[in-house]
Image (tube, rainbow, N blue to C red):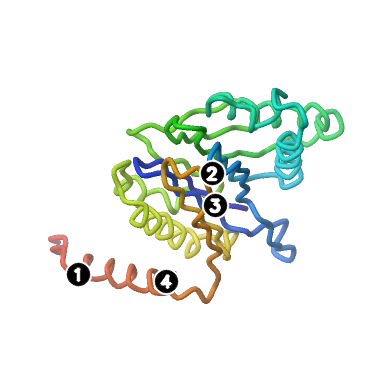
């Protein structure tokens, strides 16, 4: 399975994905689920993927081929998009194209096209935007009321995001929050696993500068996990016991 998180902030974006794929307890692999395309100074796009790996890899390949199209006006070229709304529609068309190509062969399997996506980025001086796309290629956009999206095994990491996430957060604090969400998920779900690919993007820089792969021995993540456990135990002890 998978766990991915995208957060939209006034300062930019935080995007993260685990790397575990699971086709049974004896068939576990690692695959990158955070994908980027950029033209420094012009546009930057980030895609997180979850679900059927064959489908999501095909979608990523279509998008990559589109960015290499010779005609800048090609409707499947992310770099030809003038707004993030146009760009997310290109992603949606790629999802539907994969379904169109493979649909007849895979239709007997009801979950053959089970996939979901988080797509974010910035074009020119338009503000950064964040979207969640479904297997049908349709999408919704993050707002100040709900500044984050999750896909995959989201239930374990959602409570802390619901309580803490705000668009006014600093990028460093948001990255810490996302990693705490991952820590909760990793503790409760074996189908999500390290390493984690994480990216932070600062508004209006229009280039990738801060990406990191967080593995089992990452000192910050180990410290964060330990300190969070101690803080939760201390908070629990400080709350008055139920009167029975």
Q: Nearer the viewer, residue 163 or 131?
A: 131
- Is residue 242 toward the left or the right of residue 33 in the image? left
Pointers 4 and 3 in contact (C-beta within 8 Å):
no
Per the image, the residue denoted by label 4 is: 220
Name the residue at 21% across, 65% down: 235
Separation of residues labelled 2 and 4 (CA atoms): 24 Å
Circle 2 is placed at which residue position? Answer: 151
- The residue tagged 1 is 237
Query: How far is mark 4 from mark 1, CA to CA?
Result: 26 Å
Identify the mark nearer the N-term, 3 or 2.
Answer: 3
| Crowd tier of the residue under label 3, counting other residues whose Cα lies within 10 Å: few below 14, some 14–19, many 20 or above | many
First in residue order: circle 4 vs circle 3: 3
Instruction: Give the number of the mark in front: 4 or 1.
Output: 4
Distance of label 3 from label 1 (alpha carbons): 31 Å
Which of the 4 image quarters holds residue 204?
A: top left
Q: CA distance from mark 4 to mark 3?
A: 20 Å
Q: Position of residue 4 (x, y in %)?
A: 53, 49
Counting residues from the start of the chain, the first of labels 4 and 1 encountered is 4
Name the quadrant containing residue 43.
top right
Label 2, secondary structure: give it.
Answer: strand
Task: Please tell me which of labels 2 and 4 falls first in the chain.
Answer: 2
The answer to the question of whether label 2 and label 1 lie on touching residues, with beta carbons closer than 8 A, is no
Upstream in sequence: badge 3 or badge 1 = 3
Which is closer to the viewer, label 3 or label 1?
3
């Amino acid at each position: 399975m998978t766990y991915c998180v995208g957060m939209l902030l006034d300062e930019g974006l935080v995007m993260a994905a685990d790397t575990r794929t699971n086709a049974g307890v004896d068939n576990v692999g690692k695959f990158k689920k955070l994908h980027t395309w950029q033209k420094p100074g012009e546009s930057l796009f980030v895609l997180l993927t979850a679900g059927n790996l064959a489908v999501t890899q095909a979608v990523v390949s279509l998008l990559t081929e589109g960015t290499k199209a010779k005609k800048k006006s090609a409707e499947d070229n992310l770099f030809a998009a003038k707004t993030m709304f146009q760009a997310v529609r290109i992603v949606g068309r790629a999802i539907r194209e994969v379904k169109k190509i493979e649909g007849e062969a895979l239709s007997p399997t009801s979950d053959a096209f089970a996939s979901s996506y988080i797509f974010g980025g910035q074009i020119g001086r338009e503000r950064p935007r964040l979207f969640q796309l479904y297997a049908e290629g349709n999408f919704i956009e993050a707002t100040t009321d709900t500044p984050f999206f999750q896909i995959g095994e989201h239930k374990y990491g959602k409570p802390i995001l619901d309580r803490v996430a705000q668009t006014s957060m600093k990028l460093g604090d948001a990255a810490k929050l996302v990693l705490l969400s991952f820590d909760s998920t990793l503790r409760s779900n074996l189908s999500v696993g390290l390493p984690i690919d994480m990216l932070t993007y600062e508004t209006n820089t229009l280039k990738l500068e801060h990406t990191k792969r967080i593995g089992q021995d990452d000192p910050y993540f180990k410290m964060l996990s330990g300190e969070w456990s101690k803080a939760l135990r201390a908070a629990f002890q400080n709350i008055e016991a139920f009167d029975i």
